[in-house]
Amino acid sequence: DEDPDRRAARFFAFVILQVRPVRFVLGSYETLGLRRVRQDDCLCADPPYLLGLAVYNERGAWSEVHERRLLAFLDRAHACGIPFGLSNVLVHKGRRHVLLED
């Protein structure tokens, strides 16, 4: 049984691909920069979840510093009129993601 969020994302991607040409760029927002992004582009950010317990969190590969930088980048994208999607969680095991809520 497929996760409903994954199924919705696959359906959305299918619909978008039918409507207009899509260019995928895989990489870090830090190397992408907003100068290479046009207003008719759409950014998709799928970072490690700060509230999750995974190897990358335990080893410091993704921390609150990284999260703040990504959220600041997305704020700048929004200020430039560039739409984006962000996968993340607001609450996990009773912990709230205050940075994301703000």
Image (cartoon, helix red, strand yellow):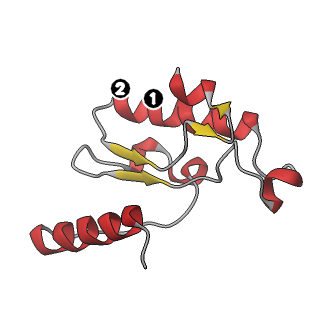
Name the residue: 69% across, 42% down. 93
Name the residue: 45% across, 29% down. 75
**Label 2 neighbour load within 10 Å: few <14, some 14-19, many 20+:** few
Of residues 11 and 46, the one drawn nearer to the viewer in this rendering: 11
Q: What is the distance, in whole Å, between disc 2 and disc 1 at their CAs?
A: 6 Å
Check residue 5 in the rendering and tell me which mark sits there, or answer none. none
**Amino acid type indicated by mark 1:** Asp
**Label 1 neighbour load within 10 Å: few <14, some 14-19, many 20+:** some
Tell whether 19 sits left or right of 64. left
Q: Secondary structure at mark 2?
A: helix
| Picture coordinates of residue 25, whole percent (x, y) | 43, 66
Disc 1: which residue = 75
**Amino acid type indicated by mark 2:** Ala
Residue 67 figure quarter: top right
Name the residue: 77% across, 41% down. 63
Of residues 73 and 32, the one drawn nearer to the viewer in this rendering: 73
